[in-house]
Image (cartoon, grey):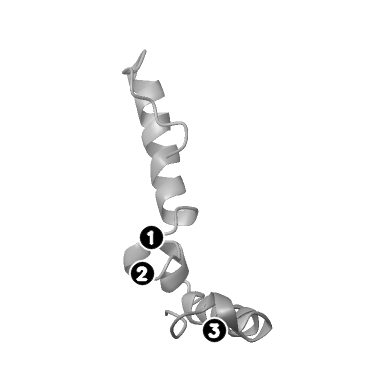
Amino acid sequence: MPNYQSKGFNDIIEARLLGKNFVKWYNMEHWLCGIQFVTQAEPYAGLDKEILKKRTKVYEAARQANPKRWSADIRN
């Protein structure tokens, strides 16, 4: 998490707030390499398949525009 608190907390409320914000960030904003760089929430909402289709189209267009930059097939 970009602003993760590493020095400890002043009180339990501060700790709970950071925990709540961390979980929200991890599930809603953080892209995970193990699930093809989508967030944890996107597959559960059924959004990942459309995101990955659009990403593939972008990669294919980039490869057609500049084939010398691509040494192999596009990755999933």
Residue position marked by numbered label 3 in the rendering: 53
Secondary structure of the residue carrying tag 1 is: loop
Taking the image as shown, residue 16 lies to the left or right of residue 73, namely left
Taking the image as shown, residue 61 lies to the left or right of residue 20, namely right
Amino acid type of disc 2? Ile
Seen from the viewer's position, the closer of residues 41 and 16 is 41
| Most distant residue in the top direction | 10
The residue at the point 47 percent across, 82 percent down is: 74
Rendered location of residue 69, percent (x, y): 56, 75
Q: Quadrant of residue 64?
A: bottom right
Q: Which mark is residue 32?
A: 1
Crowdedness near tag 1: few (<14), some (14–19) or many (≥20) residues, C-alpha within 10 Å: few
Position of residue 19 relative to residue 64, above or below, is above
Could you tell me if the residues under marks 3 and 2 are in contact, i.e. CB atoms within 8 Å?
Answer: no
Q: Which mark is residue 35?
A: 2
Q: How far separated are the C-alphas under marks 3 and 2?
A: 14 Å
Q: Earlier in the sequence, mark 3 or mark 2?
A: 2
| Most distant residue in the front direction | 68
Q: Quadrant of residue 60?
A: bottom right
The residue at the point 65 percent across, 83 percent down is: 61
Amino acid type of disc 3? Lys
Position of residue 25 relative to residue 31, above or below, is above
Could you tell me if the residues under marks 1 and 2 are in contact, i.e. CB atoms within 8 Å?
Answer: yes
The residue at the point 36 percent across, 63 percent down is: 33
Amino acid type of disc 1? Leu
The residue at the point 47 percent across, 37 percent down is: 2
Q: Earlier in the sequence, mark 1 or mark 3?
A: 1
Q: How far separated are the C-alphas under marks 1 and 2?
A: 6 Å
